[in-house]
Image (tube, rainbow, N blue to C red):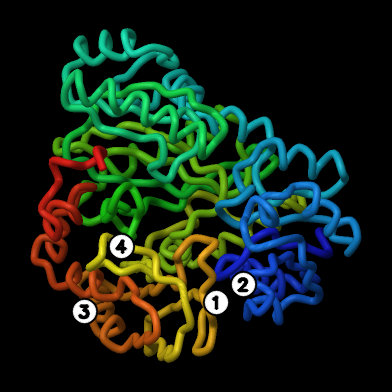
Amino acid sequence: MIQRVLVANRGEIALRVIRACRDLNLSVVVVYSTADRDGPWLKQADEAICIGQGPATESYLRRERIIAAAEITGADAIHPGYGFLSENADFAEICRECNIEFIGPSHEAMKRLGNKNQARGLAMKANVPVVPGTEGLIESEEAALKFARFAGYPVLIKAAAGGGGRGMRVAHNDASLISGFQTAKQEALAAFKDGSVYIEKYIEKPRHIEVQILGDRHGNVVHLYERECSMQRRHQKLVEESPAPNLPSKVRDRICDAAVRLVKSAGYYSAGTCEFLVDKDNNFYFIEVNARIQVEHPVTELVTGIDLVREQIRIASGEKLSFRQSDIQQRGSAIECRINAEDPDNNFQPCPGLIQKWIPAGGPGIRLDTHACSGYRIPPNYDSLVAKLLVHQPTRDDAIKVMRRALGEFTVEGIKTTIPIHQKIFNTPAFIEGMVDTTFIERVFYGHAAKLGKE
């Protein structure tokens, strides 16, 4: 069993991993940047090591400093959380070469699934439906135009590496394809040091459904059902829930089975997420695998009762899954709101700064994952997520009502947050009825769905 874990992340996910380690009676080390020297989560660790300046490129992305911190403190495992180095196959390989367990999938599986174009190929071999698209990477504008004219507009230009909406552009005609092709390549090169792209047919107003999976090193793989992640802005999720509303049970079963089939074919273990698009006729298409724990993993924890981070650590220790597929059930309805330090009335401009007042929501059925508190100063260097507000109730209607109450209770002063846009969402009839798709936010609240992917 792993004895001492180094947490190579920050904020709420660092605190989340620390708590899972404590529950398993493990010692914990955290690394931090100078911008996070006052981070509340640091006090919960046994030891904290500063690894550099505020910019992530000078701290959380410095592999050699993280490895050195693990060696100095005697950590025998590293948990990368999400973001930063969590899906860096080279980092996972370096960890294991240094006799430090990487709490995540093997670097071989990460390489097979981390490149979206290669993952498409694996999916097709595993008989998992994929969005119609190019067979390989697109190297020239001429090749891009040839495919788009054959498949018909609109099409989606996608970076082969990375995710989070970066290196992704929708094209509705030849002119926007040429412009979007170059922009996507440049953005992907800057974000992932890999400017390669491919092109898919763009599915109009799709739902974004993802399936949580767990696999051990003994060949056992299970799914923990699906999450609805369609409530997005510029491909960034705002609200997630499980079960997905209005998704036929037969479709749910087929998507979940497809996810298990795919990750088994890749020799995958640890936690991971298979993401799909679902069209208006409930046809589903694989789009990518996130080879890490997801921001929205608590949604699945609430409806299944399984602690995903603890399971990651146990799997990394070589243990078999302690449950079978038939043991896993969805119970009730769980919904998560991402509370970001952003101004939704000003193009979601990031709002770092001092939290002057912080009064969180509470009561039965509410979970709040956060590192923030009154007096905490949000640095400008990192992602704007400050809290994940979740509710779990017997029915979706109950969950929506409790979330409305919780959002009304949640008081944050000194910075702008996304609480107001969430309050609008949970009072919108179409959302209440579960009539959602990935264009919902722009279409309903900002009136420019036609511009999606062009901003």
Relative vertical location of residue 200 with respect to residue 148 in this rendering, above or below: below
Q: Which of marks 4 and 1 is nearer the N terminus?
A: 4
24 is higher (above) or lower (below) than 209: below
Crowd tier of the residue under label 4, counting other residues whose Cα lies within 10 Å: few below 14, some 14–19, many 20 or above: some
Residues at marks 1 and 3, CA–CA distance in whole angstroms: 25 Å
Instruction: State the SS at label 1.
Output: loop
Disc on res. 371: 1
**Residues tagged 2 and 1 counted as in contact (Cβ below 8 A):** yes
Q: Is residue 87 above or below residue 392?
A: above
Task: Decide if residue 334 is in sight here.
Answer: no
Lower position in the chain sequence, tag 2 or tag 4: 2
Residue type, label 3? Lys
Which secondary structure, mark 2?
helix
Crowding at label 1, few (<14), some or many (≥20) Cα neighbours within 10 Å?
A: many
Give the secondary structure at mark 4: loop
Choose the circle earlier in sequence order: 3 or 2.
2
Which label was assigned to residue 15?
Answer: 2
Q: Position of residue 60 (x, y in %)?
A: 67, 56
Determine the secondary structure under disc 3. helix
Residue at point 43%, 27% (across, down) = 185
Which numbered disc, 3 or 2, marks the residue closer to the eye? 2
Q: What residue type is labelled 2?
A: Leu
**Total number of numbered labels?**
4
In terms of depth relative to the viewer, which is nearer, 104 or 117?
A: 117
Would residue 419 appear left or right of 359 to someone viewing this image? left
Question: What number is the disc on residue 348?
Answer: 4
Give the percent coordinates (x, y) of residue 393: 31, 75
